[in-house]
Amino acid sequence: MIKMMNAWVLRKPSLVDDRPLELVDVPVPVPRDDELLVRVSACGICRTDLHVVEGELPVRLSPVIPGHQIVGRVTAIGSTVADFQLSDRVGVAWLNRTCAKCKYCLSGRENLCEQALFTGWSVNGGFAEYAIAPASFTYRIPDDFEDIDAAPLLCAGIIGYRCLRLTGLSEQEWKGARLGIYGFGAAGHICIQLARARGAEVYVCTRDRERHQALAHELGATWVGDTAEEPPVKLDTAIIFAPAGELVPVALKALAKGGTLVLGGIHMSAIPSFDYSLIYGERMIRSVANNTRADGQEFLVEAASIPVRTHVQTFPFDQANDALIALKHDAIRGAGVLRF
Ligand SMILES: [Zn+2]
Ligand SMILES: [Zn+2]
């Protein structure tokens, strides 16, 4: 007899206010030889899920189960998997599988793999009772974190870590560095904790005084302003997490000479043209695309050592559409998580 499970599926991208996810019964997936079957206990909600559901990212699999910040326990193991056991606690993130042979995979840049598969976009994700994932792309969750608190680490956390890395600042250079963060949701609220622990001063530009600005103050921001407000000092480096291209010239204006502006989103609205003077002075702009497994592993170690405390707003499993609506309308303080 085929075992069935509850899952949220997207048949056709549409605005989240139309509640496009449908709760259906589907067969529990069967892990392949190199995969694990995970009983999901928590799944984070990410802006990328919103981009998948609303069709800003092209359809890769249809219907698809979204969700790529999965925490759960191993309940079945493929025949060639050696290093996991039943009931191990694991995390599954966005990068689901790579080809292991393209020039990117062979040069430590598997995040850019031409054949990469992504959880909750090109393969089914964690808005379901069970999910499968390749064991070698699965993380062990440090004991310091409860399931619900760990979920946002798996994308929001890892991406923030990679953004910090791509600023180009060394461990020494972080001490006393002035970091700007534009947009203060799930990624921003974790990123500030890493940056502060490394000794940086953090300047946060975000809308929403009650939720995002208040949380930024609480987490030790040196200065907090509105999205378009100019910080009182020049920033050594800055990260934009908000998917708003109009912030690029705003952030460049606040950036000191030689600084790097990192764009942390998978999707951004069009960037308006700007004067060459804004980027002159050897300022750099670079995007972040996905992450490598090394990013994930290094981040989880650093997060546990601080320890990072995620601020989580949970939604019961049957409220996936409501959770996405809340995210879209900026109504989540910290990170949203579906709990089972
Ligand atoms: Zn590859
Ligand atoms: Zn994500």
Image (tube, rainbow, N blue to C red):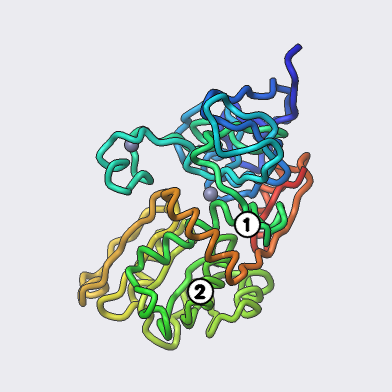
Q: In this view, does 305 lie above or below 323?
A: below
Q: Is mark 1 on a helix, strand or loop?
A: loop
State the residue lying farthest toward the bottom: 232
Residue 312: x and y in percent read 70, 60
**Residue 309 quadrant:** bottom right
Residue 12: x and y in percent read 57, 28
> Does the closest atom of ligand 2 sit within 8 Å of the Cβ of label 2?
no
Q: Residue under circle 1?
A: 142
Q: Please, what is the three-letter code of the amino acid marked with disc 2?
A: Cys
Left-right relation of 9 to 81: right
Residue 101: x and y in percent read 30, 34
Residue drawn 37% across the image and 84% down it = 234
**Residue 184 quadrant:** bottom right
**Residue 239 quadrant:** bottom left
Could you give the CA–CA distance between mark 1 and mark 2, rounded to whole angstroms? 31 Å
Q: Residue under circle 2?
A: 205
Residue drawn 66% across the image and 34% down it = 21
The C terminus sits in image quarter = top right
Q: Please, what is the three-letter code of the amino acid marked with disc 1?
A: Pro
